[in-house]
Image: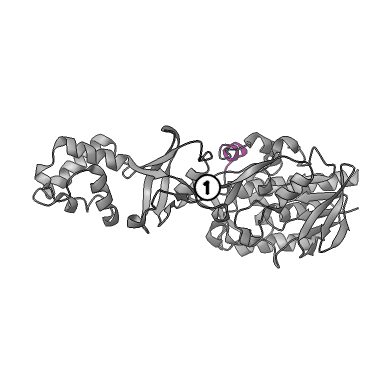
């Protein structure tokens, strides 16, 4: 009797180690030559391990099926995750936004700690691609890989989603789930850059800090936050935009646009006083030359065009109505959004195995005895800030412990 874990990412590594630590015989199948390929590139190679908040804080950052995670997070909270890695030799630090990173800023340290723990717990790793699950009479009996059948009394599918396919997340878990009779919510890119009509070539490379981005769905405000963003040749990117994309789920049936408040620290009355002050200093200048103290040089021509003020108009001739138009542009810089970048460029995948068909208390399939799911393959995803890795750690650990304990019975 043994347990097979498919996938050597965050959820799979945690599941395998947890099950082995309980005394189960565990085999981990990983397509790549090394485990943790996607973990290695998370947080720009620094690995945003989790978020230093309570369980409620995590749930508030999970827009899809948060309540499904209640048991998993209760069993393995952010505090537990931090204690786990500290106890396995990885000192951690908390940065802005309560984001937790290794003190070393090296994701490799997280992977090494998990790998060492797994091996010491007795996990056997086979670098082979699993082709299919072996299910008989509604019960899992093994997996097929490399032309061979490997028997197992429990199988944990932790294959990830369909984002970053070069790391091994090619959507195999969805295929396994469908073959097992599960409903798979169509995968969509989440935490992904956004595409604008015609791109943003004139602003390409411009990074904005301390701005407020507000998302509108069919002209209804649905999300807003402060932070950093970036203009690219195809549209928009950066931390704020990735978070915004998680709320934009209905392209095709809904219309989306973004408004950027370029000066969120100033209300309209204060900003108008600032404009009057700047205009007084440049009263004999052309309008386009009077905004250098207020805005990055690269965005000035665009702001001028959107304000519909003649760029060569003298500042001392600008009317109150024109100043109001400029003020509106600064506080509501409009960007139409036509779609998202491909799922291959997404940090995480939205969609996946329907959580209605998985037990939230064990992560076991309600359709096939002995089959478990963990991590991004499930229809649960979160915003940026370490929350998606938290989901992987929590669901992976719960699946591993549940499989091992049921094996004992």
Between residue 322 and residue 2, name the one nearer to us: 322
Q: Is residue 149 on the magenta stretch?
A: no
Between residue 403 and residue 181, name the one nearer to us: 181
Is residue 177 shown left or right of residue 310?
right
Q: How is the image coloured?
A: one colour
- Seen from this angle, which residue lies furthest bottom? 33
Q: Residues within 10 Å of mark 1 (few under 14, many from 20)?
A: some
Q: Is residue 218 visible?
A: yes
Query: Up-down: is 118 above or below 351?
Result: below
Q: Is residue 90 visible?
A: no
Q: Is residue 58 on the magenta stretch?
A: yes
For the residue labelled by badge 1, is the local secondary structure a helix, a strand or a loop? helix
Q: Report x, y in % for residue 322.
A: 18, 39
Q: Report x, y in % for residue 58.
A: 59, 40
Which region of the structure is painted magenta?
53-60
Count of numbered labels shown in the rendering:
1
- Seen from this angle, which residue lies furthest top? 220
Q: Quadrant of residue 274?
A: top left
Q: Residue at x 62, y 39 (%)?
A: 55
Q: Report x, y in % for residue 144.
A: 83, 57
Residue at the spot of label 1 = 98
Is residue 385 shown left or right of residue 195?
right
The secondary structure that most of the magenta stretch takes on is: helix
Q: Quadrant of residue 203?
A: bottom left
Between residue 72 and residue 295, name the one nearer to us: 295
Q: Residue at x 25, y 52 (%)?
A: 301
Between residue 9 and residue 92, name the one nearer to us: 9
Q: Residue at x 19, y 44 (%)?
A: 309
Query: Up-down: is 142 above or below 307?
Result: below
Q: Residue at x 26, y 56 (%)?
A: 297
């Amino acid at each position: 009797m043994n347990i097979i874990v498919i996938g050597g990412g965050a959820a799979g590594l945690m599941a395998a180690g947890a099950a082995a630590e309980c005394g189960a015989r565990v085999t981990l199948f990983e397509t790549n030559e090394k485990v943790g390929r996607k973990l290695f590139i998370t947080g720009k190679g620094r690995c945003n391990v989790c978020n230093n908040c309570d369980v409620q804080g995590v749930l508030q950052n999970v827009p899809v099926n948060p309540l499904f995670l209640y048991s998993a997070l209760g069993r393995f909270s952010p505090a537990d995750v931090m204690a786990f890695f500290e106890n396995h030799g990885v000192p951690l630090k908390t940065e802005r936004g309560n984001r937790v990173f290794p003190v070393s800023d090296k994701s490799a340290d997280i992977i090494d700690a998990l790998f060492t723990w797994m091996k010491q717990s007795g996990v056997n790793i086979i670098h082979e691609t699993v082709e299919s699950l072996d299910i008989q009479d509604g019960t899992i009996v093994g997996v097929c890989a490399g032309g061979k059948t490997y028997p197992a009394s429990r199988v944990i599918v932790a294959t990830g989603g369909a984002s970053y396919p070069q790391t091994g997340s090619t959507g195999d878990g969805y295929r396994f789930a469908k073959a097992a009779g599960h409903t798979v919510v169509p995968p969509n890119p989440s935490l992904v850059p956004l595409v604008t009509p015609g791109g943003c070539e004139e602003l390409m490379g411009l990074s904005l800090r301390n701005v407020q981005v507000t998302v509108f769905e069919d002209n209804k405000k649905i999300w807003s936050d402060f932070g950093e963003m970036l203009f690219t040749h195809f549209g928009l990117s950066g931390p704020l935009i990735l978070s915004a994309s998680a709320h934009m789920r209905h392209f095709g049936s809904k219309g989306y646009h973004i408004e950027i408040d370029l000066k969120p620290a100033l209300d309209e009355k204060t900003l108008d006083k600032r404009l009057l002050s700047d205009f007084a200093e440049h009263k004999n200048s052309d309008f386009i030359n009077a905004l250098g103290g207020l805005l990055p040089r690269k965005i000035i021509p665009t702001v001028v065009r959107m304000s519909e003020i003649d760029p060569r108009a003298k500042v001392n001739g600008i009317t109150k109505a024109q100043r109001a138009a400029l003020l509106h542009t600064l506080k509501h810089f409009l960007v139409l959004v036509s779609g998202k970048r491909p799922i291959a460029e997404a940090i995480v995948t939205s969609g996946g195995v329907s959580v209605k068909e998985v037990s939230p208390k064990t992560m076991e399939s309600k359709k096939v005895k002995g089959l478990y799911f963990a991590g991004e393959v499930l229809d649960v995803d979160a915003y940026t800030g370490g929350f998606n890795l938290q989901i992987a750690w929590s669901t992976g650990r719960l699946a591993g412990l549940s499989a091992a304990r049921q094996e004992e019975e």
